[in-house]
Image (cartoon, grey):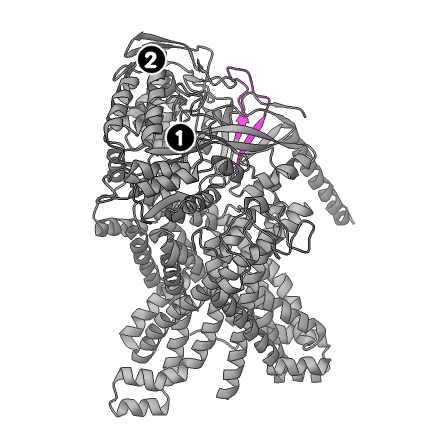
């Protein structure tokens, strides 16, 4: 008899536990982000993928960062940044900040963080920091940074990938003990749990120096497939997803409580055209050596149709310097350029083009990139070009085309500029680094002069003018063609009040919730 | 009715015929694709994007099975895709059959150390999942486009799929070796190669052919899986697997894009399976 | 029994060695996995530095010998993607794959046992006919396509089940059914054939003649002997099931070792691929050993010396 009663008792208890745990979860104000991938490492200087930095930025803060609304560089963990002379910078640090594990944030933490990157060349971001000649403590909350030369892009570079300041005691202990890396920073969220290729779970930092975030628990969930991300947003399993395909916009809008929001990314679709052979294309010679063929390739592109192919998810551009980056110019940005297939044909005839094959390499990495490639190939074939298209998966593309710079006549790839400074746009275009197009000639020499001068020019207005001039050189000699600055569409549950910043970082320290 | 079903099952001819009909249809599509297909499979038309099949609202008879995300005709793409499936399915099987037959008969005939070595290699390959091995090979070489892409897939699927053939060939050869006329041929001092080709091969052909017919289906599915993962045939070439991968993002909004290629794969594989089953029954009946 | 098990375990060693050779040769001739180690703007000098740091500049034979000597102590090297030891990476994802495989097997048996038995008992009926057609179609259906269709109906349209992931207990249902159905189509055919044969056996006829109830005969006698072929087929299909689960894990974003393998192969993450294929191959071999051993339990007439 007693036994018979025990069973229902146990059932009731089990139900009570289940219910209470469910209630506890809603009280935690959890927000789940559906992203295409999550980090392969939680140690910021060792993983530069954009989706990885999204997680890093929520756990770590940088000395200088971009204002979330205006994208201007502002002191963040630093309270002031002062240029002592052309190569010396003095940063005062905030004194009200502690790490998630209770360690105090001070000058020694800053020095340890950056010295660690400078000392270890195997870290991916190491080359991004070699402009630092020396970093030293001037006081408990003052650091001085000496650069290898005049550094006009200091504010941009100091907030580059891997800039998150780490807890030094914790870091030294982990380096000594080995094993899995556990991130400890000062950011709005602290690390709880990570299941590789599945999710990263963070919890709100009640002691955050800008105020505790409203979100109690923040989960980044890896959902590689776009349609699956959409399904999860519709069912309420996730609160925010990125890169929503056009065919799903209406479903998300029609669904109760969800909507889509457009944003502009930092990535531009660009096409290097090969002008001469470089290290990994020995003996190359092809029709694109001739400026008239490059012009024909450019004139055959109907950018309006291309924007249509990507469902309007791009702003047509003739340059990779896009707002708000210094040097962006109306002559190049938001321009479809000239579309004239007749003149393209005439130029090809004038150049004596006789159907030589043009190898066109690209990958499927970005939104509808494959479709864009197929339509481009059709446009070029329409003016009489013989296109041999190779559309590769992203990894194969990177290994076989991108890294060895083995691209031939035409190549297409999206390049980002999360530094918000033009130096990186032209850095790979200076002498000795032109492996993607082998750009030579008087205009290329002029470009070299401008790149070197701009890199050390401390006057912003003079620097801006140099970068505009560089864009004009590109437009004249066509070492690259540009198609569009990519836009993105995020799907969001309306309980989450948050807007995408210009740098595309999913930093949710300032997000609010309506429920 | 009951009687009819029983007789059908016993003879298996009707399902065998159905299999033959399906396989022939696919082969005809593959061979005559440019003639049969109403449109150029690569011709895009941005004003005609994602049209539904003709029997649904908004569909048109010009595109009987609708259009894809670039306004290309789904039916024409299906028909052209049959080429890759037929070529990869057949040649992939032939390569696997070739490797498996040679290694299997050699192991079974000579026995001893040769058999021991080949059998260990066989064990190794049997334990590695087919698709993982194929993935590994492709990851090494990198996906290829055009004709070299087809060659790569044929080699990959052949190298990954030979183990079954070798296992069967080895077993059958060991059994055939003890047959009286084989033993007498050896006693007469005939060369091993001659004995293998003249006496053993005809005796083990039947199970190998049946296995081959069934393997065609497996290879077609494997090709579709690899293309679906983006590692098989590369665009602009079109296959059922890449069509499925493209249509995957549209399952909720344009179901036909992912449905028709799936149906095409299923029908083709069912056809080859039915044909294989029928061959087995027919060959079994003869050997008894 | 024990000597037999020992012998079988020892027999696994040569194929495992063969495996290391195959994989090493395969993955090393293709190129170097530096793509994930350096940033896009990296210069050739930076790439050379990273190559040296990871030992990619040593002779191939030296790299292989070093790798194998480490494998013996369970060290498959460091994942270039995750920058942590490879074997624990695979092992930490294995439970998810085992869970999915077990659930799929459960689905397959729940479907195949009753359907196969009924098809055999009522052979040549309408039911049998429909079963035959369904299993034939099932054999031709790519399982990732079935998965997409199930996701469309049950997750997107009806919203009964989660579309992907492994966060909720119910999330296992759709991938498990996807894999389970494709196993079941094979099992049903095998079970039906075996049952038909067993029902014609003398001892079954005898049991029937003794007046035992039909269902007792079917379940106790015929089914038990037929299970041998079912178990054999499950053993033979293990490698195939694991292979198929890679694609299904990808479709449903199931965080198992299959998806880890796929991303590792794509990223040329040699250490993880080596560890993964090793674990899978070992798994397949162990299952086959268990299948062999289960024969004696299912059919006491079989003895092992």
Q: Position of residue A465 (x, y in %)?
A: 35, 16
Relative depth, front residue between A174 and A341:
A341
Binning the other alpha carbons within 10 Å of mark 1 as few (below 14), some (14 to 19) or many (20 upward) gives: many
| Location of residue A143 with respect to C151 vertically, above or below | above
Q: Position of residue B142 (x, y in %)?
A: 36, 51
Residue named by callout 1: A43
Q: Position of residue A76 (x, y in %)?
A: 45, 15
Task: Say if residue C98 shows up in the picture.
Answer: no
Image quadrant for the C terminus of chain C? Answer: bottom left
Q: CA distance from mark 1 to mark 2?
A: 38 Å
Relative depth, front residue between A225 and A146:
A225
Q: Main secondary structure of the magenta part?
A: loop
**Residues marked 1 and 2 touching at CB (< 8 Å):** no
Residue A205 on the magenta segment: yes
Image quadrant for the N terminus of chain C? Answer: bottom left
Quarter of the figure with residue B88: bottom left
Residue named by callout 2: A462
Please name which of the two marks, 1 or 2, marks the residue nearer to the observer. 2
| Location of residue B54 with respect to A241 vertically, above or below | below
Q: Position of residue C100 (x, y in %)?
A: 55, 52
Magenta part of the protein: which range?
A202-221
Q: Secondary structure at mark 2?
A: helix
N-term-proximal mark, 1 vs 2: 1
Labels 1, 2: one chain: yes
Q: Secondary structure at mark 1?
A: loop
Q: Viewed as shown, does residue C86 lie left or right of B272?
A: left
Task: Name the chain letter of the residue that bears numbered label 1.
Answer: A
The single residue placed furthest to the right in the displayed view is: A1
């Amino acid at each position: 008899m007693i036994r018979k009663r025990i069973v229902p008792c146990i059932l009731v208890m089990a139900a009570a536990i289940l219910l209470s745990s469910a209630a506890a979860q809603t009280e935690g104000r959890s927000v789940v982000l559906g992203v295409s991938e999550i980090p392969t490492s939680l140690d910021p200087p060792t993983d530069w993928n954009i989706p990885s930095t999204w997680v890093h930025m929520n756990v770590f803060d940088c000395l200088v960062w971009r204002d979330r609304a205006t994208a201007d560089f502002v002191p963040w963990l630093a309270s002031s940044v002062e240029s002592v002379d052309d190569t010396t910078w003095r940063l005062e640090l905030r004194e009200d900040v502690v790490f998630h594990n209770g360690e105090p944030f001070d000058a020694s933490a800053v020095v340890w963080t950056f010295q660690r990157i400078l000392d270890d060349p195997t870290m991916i971001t190491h080359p991004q920091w070699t402009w630092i000649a020396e970093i030293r403590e001037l006081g408990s909350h003052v650091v001085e940074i000496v650069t290898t030369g005049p550094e006009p892009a200091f504010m941009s570079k100091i907030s580059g990938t891997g800039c998150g300041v780490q807890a030094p005691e914790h870091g030294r202990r982990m380096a000594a003990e080995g094993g899995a890396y556990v991130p400890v920073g000062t950011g709005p969220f602290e690390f709880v749990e990570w299941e590789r290729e599945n999710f990263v779970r963070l919890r709100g930092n009640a002691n955050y120096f800008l105020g505790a975030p409203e979100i109690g628990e923040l989960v980044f969930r890896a959902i590689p497939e776009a349609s699956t991300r959409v399904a999860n947003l519709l069912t309420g399993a996730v609160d925010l997803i990125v890169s929503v395909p056009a065919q799903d916009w209406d479903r998300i809008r029609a669904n109760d409580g969800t909507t889509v929001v457009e944003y502009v990314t930092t990535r531009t679709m660009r096409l290097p055209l090969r002008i001469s052979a470089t290290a990994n294309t020995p003996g190359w010679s092809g029709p694109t050596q001739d400026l008239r063929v490059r012009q024909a390739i450019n004139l055959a592109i109907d950018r309006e149709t291309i924007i249509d192919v990507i469902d309007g998810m791009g702003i047509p551009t003739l340059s990779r310097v896009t707002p708000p980056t210094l040097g962006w110019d109306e002559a190049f940005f938001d321009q479809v350029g000239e579309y004239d297939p007749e003149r393209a044909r005439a130029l090809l005839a004038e150049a004596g083009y006789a159907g030589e094959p043009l190898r066109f390499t690209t990958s499927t990495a970005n939104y509808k990139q494959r479709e864009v490639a197929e339509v481009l190939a059709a446009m070029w074939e329409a003016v009489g070009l013989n296109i041999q298209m190779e559309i590769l998966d992203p990894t194969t593309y990177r290994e076989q085309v991108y890294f060895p710079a083995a691209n031939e006549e035409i190549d297409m790839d999206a390049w980002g500029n999360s530094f918000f400074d033009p130096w990186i746009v032209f850095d790979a275009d200076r002498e000795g680094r032109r492996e993607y197009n082998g750009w030579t000639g008087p205009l290329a020499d002029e470009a070299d002069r401008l790149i070197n001068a701009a890199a050390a020019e401390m006057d912003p207005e003079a620097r801006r003018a140099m970068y505009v001039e560089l864009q004009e050189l590109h437009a004249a000699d066509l070492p690259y063609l540009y198609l569009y600055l990519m836009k993105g569409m995020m799907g969001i549950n309306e309980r989450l009040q948050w807007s995408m910043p210009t740098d595309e970082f999913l930093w949710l320290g300032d997000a609010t919730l309506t429920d | 009715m009951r009687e009819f079903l029983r007789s059908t099952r016993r003879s298996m001819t009707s399902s065998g015929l159905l299999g033959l009909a399906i396989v022939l249809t696919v082969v005809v599509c593959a061979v005559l694709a440019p003639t049969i297909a109403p449109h150029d499979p690569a011709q895009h038309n941005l004003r005609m994007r994602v049209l539904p099949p003709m029997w649904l609202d908004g569909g048109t008879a010009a595109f009987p099975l609708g259009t894809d995300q670039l306004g290309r005709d789904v039916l024409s793409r299906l028909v052209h895709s049959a080429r890759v499936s037929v070529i990869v399915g057949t040649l992939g099987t032939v390569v696997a059959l070739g490797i498996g037959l040679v290694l299997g008969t050699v192991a079974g005939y000579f026995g001893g150390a040769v058999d021991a070595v080949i059998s260990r290699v066989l064990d190794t390959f049997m334990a590695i999942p087919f698709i993982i091995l194929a993935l590994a090979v492709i990851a090494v070489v990198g996906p290829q486009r055009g004709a070299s892409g087809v060659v790569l897939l044929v080699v990959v699927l052949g190298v990954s799929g030979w183990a079954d053939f070798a296992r069967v060939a080895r077993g059958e050869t060991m059994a055939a070796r003890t047959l009286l006329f084989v033993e007498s041929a050896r006693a007469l001092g005939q060369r091993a190669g001659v004995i293998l080709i003249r006496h053993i091969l005809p005796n083990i052909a039947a199970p190998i052919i049946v296995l081959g017919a069934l393997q065609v289906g497996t290879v077609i599915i494997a090709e579709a899986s690899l293309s679906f993962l983006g590692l098989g045939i590369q665009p602009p070439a079109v296959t059922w697997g890449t069509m499925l991968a493209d249509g995957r993002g549209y399952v909720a909004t344009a179901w036909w894009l992912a449905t028709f290629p799936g149906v095409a794969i299923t029908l083709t594989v069912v056809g080859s399976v039915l044909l294989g089953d029928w061959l087995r029954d027919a060959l079994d009946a003869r050997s008894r | 029994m024990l000597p037999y098990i020992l012998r079988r375990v020892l027999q696994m060693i040569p194929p495992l060695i063969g495996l290391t050779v195959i994989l090493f040769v395969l993955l090393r001739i293709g190129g170097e996995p530096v793509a994930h180690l350096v940033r896009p703007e990296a210069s050739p000098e930076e790439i050379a530095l990273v190559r040296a740091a990871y030992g990619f500049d040593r002779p191939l034979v030296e790299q292989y010998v070093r790798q194998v000597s480490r494998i013996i102590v369970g060290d498959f090297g460091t994942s270039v993607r995750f920058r942590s030891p490879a074997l624990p990476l695979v092992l930490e994802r294995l439970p998810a794959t085992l869970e999915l495989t077990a659930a799929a097997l459960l689905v397959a048996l729940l479907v195949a046992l009753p359907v196969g038995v009924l098809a055999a008992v009522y052979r040549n009926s309408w039911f049998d006919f429909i079963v035959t057609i369904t299993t034939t179609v099932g054999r031709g259906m790519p399982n990732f396509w079935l998965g997409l269709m199930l996701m469309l109906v049950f997750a997107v349209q009806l919203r009964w089940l989660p579309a992907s992931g492994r966060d909720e207990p119910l999330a296992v249902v759709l991938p498990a059914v996807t894999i389970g159905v494709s196993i079941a189509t094979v099992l049903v055919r095998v079970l039906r054939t075996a049952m038909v044969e067993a029902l014609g056996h003398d001892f079954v006829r005898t049991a029937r003649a003794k007046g035992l109830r039909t269902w007792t005969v079917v379940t106790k006698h015929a089914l038990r002997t037929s299970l041998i072929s079912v178990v054999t087929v499950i053993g033979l299909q293990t490698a195939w099931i694991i292979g198929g689960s890679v694609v299904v894990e990808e479709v449903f974003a199931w965080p198992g070792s299959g998806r880890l393998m796929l991303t590792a192969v794509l990223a040329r993450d040699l250490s993880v691929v080596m560890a993964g294929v090793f674990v899978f191959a070992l798994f397949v071999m162990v299952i086959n050993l268990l299948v062999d051993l289960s024969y004696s339990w299912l059919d006491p007439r079989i003895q092992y010396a």
